[in-house]
Image (cartoon, rainbow, N blue to C red):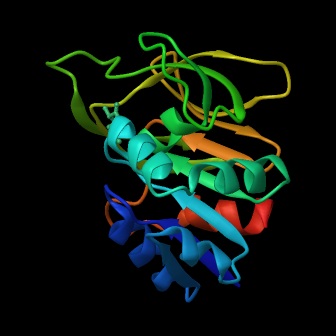
Amino acid sequence: MRIAVLALQGDFAEHEAIFHRLNVQTCQLRQKSDLAQPFDALVLPGGESTVQGKLLRELDMFDEIRSRIQNGLPVMATCAGSILLAQQLLDDTTVHLGTMGISIRRNAYGRQLSSFHTVGKFAGIDDVPMSFIRAPQIEFCAPGVEVLAEHEGRITAVRQGNQLAMTFHPELGSDCRVAEYFIKEML
Ligand code: GLN
């Protein structure tokens, strides 16, 4: 099994480190030719969605990644990655990949609360560490989108078929259980 991590910007190295702890091989997607190598799933890391979306287009990786996701490639997205997947951005007219039936608001936690750490329940796993860093909020979900985690009434993780999106970062630290969920339930 090999997991490709989009490595244009953001915390892709942390995602790779978590999969390596699980003895899962990873590869980095940095340019269009990297898409030719074999991989079984894709990670869209946190970072800055505007920059990532721009680079995906400039490097001509955008259409192929979108069609692979539409054709069922398992994808795990955190934070900025979830913004890339959302069908609607509530405070921005730009839509990036737009493959997932969620409406998302960028930087929804405001300045003071823009970064915080908590633990919460995720799809039956208790006390998962959750780091929110200038996190977006998922405000609406289309039918068929399953809510996997919430924090104080706000949706923080959702799944729609082959797509898993989170507004927090489960990859910061050493807890591997969300990555394990992705591998066991979605690959
Ligand atoms: N606020 C960032 C954005 O809009 C996302 C932050 C993150 O990925 N931690 O892209």
Figure quadrant of the C terminus: bottom right
Q: Give coordinates of residue 111: x percent, y percent.
A: 16, 18
In this rendering, the answer to whether 36 lies above or below 169 is: below
Q: Is residue 20 left or right of residue 174?
A: right
Q: Is residue 123 visible?
A: no
| Quadrant of the rendered image containing residue 130 | top left
In this rendering, the answer to whether 9 lies above or below 126 is: below
Q: Is residue 164 left or right of residue 175?
A: right
Q: Is residue 74 visible?
A: yes
Q: How many marks?
A: 0
Residue nearest the viewer, comparing 66 with 185: 66
| Quadrant of the rendered image containing residue 181 | bottom right
In this rendering, the answer to whether 185 lies above or below 80 is: below
Residue nearest the viewer, comparing 7 with 150: 7
Residue at horizontal 67 percent and vertical 61 percent from the top: 182
Q: Is residue 166 left or right of residue 73?
A: left
Q: Give coordinates of residue 41: x percent, y percent.
A: 68, 67
Residue at horizontal 76 percent and vertical 50 percent from the top: 67
| Quadrant of the rendered image containing residue 40 | bottom right
Residue at horizontal 59 percent and vertical 41 percent from the top: 165
Figure quarter occupied by ligand 1: top left
Figure quadrant of the N terminus: bottom right
Residue nearest the viewer, comparing 13 with 68: 68
Q: Give coordinates of residue 63: x percent, y percent.
A: 66, 49
Q: Give coordinates of residue 131: x percent, y percent.
A: 32, 44
Q: Is residue 2 left or right of residue 90?
A: right
Residue at horizontal 71 percent and vertical 46 percent from the top: 163
